[in-house]
Image: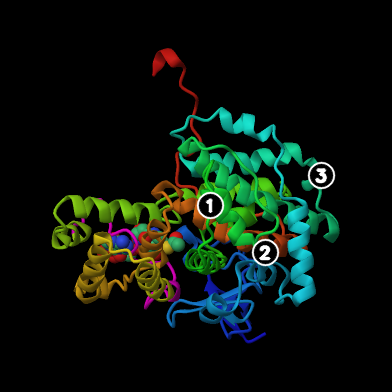
Amino acid sequence: MADKAILEYQGKRYELPVVKGTEDELAIDIKSLRANTGLITLDPGYKNTGSCSSSITFLDGEKGVLRYRGYSIEELTVKAEFLEVAYLLIFGELPNKDQLQRFHGDIKQESHVDEEMKKILDGFPKSAHPMGVLSSLTSALIAFNPSSVDVRSEEAMYNTIVRILAKFPVLVAWAMRKRQGLPLDYGDDNLGYVENLHKMMFKRPNKEYQLNKIVIDALDQLLILHADHEQNCSTSTVRITGSSHAGLFVSLSAGISALWGPLHGGANQAVLEMLEAIHEDGGDTDKYMAKAKDKDDPFRLMGFGHRVYKNFDPRARIIKKAADEVLNDLGITDPILDIAKGLEKVALEDPYFVERKLYPNVDFYSGIIYRALGIPVEMFTVMFAMGRLPGWIAQWREMRLNKEPIGRPRQLYIGANDRPFVPLKKR
Ligand code: ACO
């Protein structure tokens, strides 16, 4: 214990323990606040509220630091593969060769999806957004794997984790192929995890699939960059859904829904749509900057600002470099990238953005790479979900192993007081 905070209320003094994290972060422990004082805390958007203690991801928004289990994102993106990072996040340590092989082998054993699932997918219109499709299919998986709800033992938990890591890429690929009218295929167990995902997404009938290392490496890096980000909106949703012991698959399905919104994972799609709109409108970035600053205009500069990063988003730095490299390697010149760079330059110097500490976030550049990789814009947030899968799993597992209580916030009621019912004819 680091210290104590004193709360004075109605002439009484209350001592509240101050607890310290391993990176010297401090928190006032208010577990006994209501019982001792009758008070609750009010913190809309949870800007000051820690919902749990976690040993998975550390981020320092002021310094722009992001580490998974102590390893920096800068190192992991160049030295590790996505599946290694998934193992690290979920189980706490980097796997050795045998552990990784076994993990991948177990995943391959589960890499089929029940054919009946295709009937569910069939029920969706072709125009359905793939995030909605993915969320529904992830939830539907439970009907075909009912044992995945019961995760009381570590073994059952492991089997459930392996199962979803195996089947999720198939669902991602199906969500995309359905929209494109392509046959629904399965993967190739001879390939690496990310190669297999890419092949499932892009294999055309009657054509041999060509593996491109630049593309696979870029995709691997993007997935790692998105793999976890502590207690964000979708992760908190996964944890809170799972806290009712509803099961992993439905908790993930809830997380996918939360990620979909344009203020969260949906921002990558919104960024590209915004850049395309600016391009079609003649490329006048000043006009859109003015709209973003106008309080009477609901327009926001998508891909700018972050709840916790207030100096820079380390993921955005890595991804910006990667975007340049990928476009260069693939020989792509994209006018959208020029618009993005123009907007970034203006925003970084504009007092409105500087004063509010609004910097490009990970989504500002990810869409440009996805586009270069031939991924359709409505799949961008699905790719984010694919990357975030191990983080969600790790957070869910931690929550269950810590035996955390059901998540149930309080509220400050500000509605009408007790009043007599008014019959319909008198209203
Ligand atoms: N464009 C213009 N103004 C902005 C923007 C933006 N993108 N973001 C924040 N602001 C302004 C707000 O209007 C507010 O101004 P005010 O103080 O004059 O009222 C101030 O900056 C603070 O903004 P908040 O909304 O209070 O910041 P918050 O931390 O709640 O929101 C968020 C963060 C949601 C990311 C916000 O910056 C935003 O909407 N950005 C655009 C969407 C986006 O890119 N989301 C992706 C986030 S990253 C991720 O999920 C992976």
Q: Quadrant of residue 353?
A: bottom left
Answer with mark 3 or mark 1, whichever residue precedes in sequence: 3
Secondary element at image label 3? helix
Amino acid at the residue labelled 1: Gln
Residue 157 horizontal/vertical position (percent): 79, 57
- For label 1, the residue is 411
Alpha carbon distance from label 3 to label 1: 36 Å
Secondary element at image label 2? helix
Residue drawn at x 16%, y 51% is 281
Image: magenta residue range: 294-315
Whether residue 48 appears in magenta in the rendering, the answer is no
Amino acid at the residue labelled 3: Ser
Is 205 placed left or right of 404 in the picture? left
Label 3 close to label 1 by CB (< 8 Å): no
- For label 2, the residue is 394
Q: Is residue 33 visible?
A: yes
Answer with mark 2 or mark 3, whichever residue precedes in sequence: 3
Within 10 Å of disc 3 (Cα), the crowding (few <14, some 14-19, many 20+) is: few
Within 10 Å of disc 1 (Cα), the crowding (few <14, some 14-19, many 20+) is: few
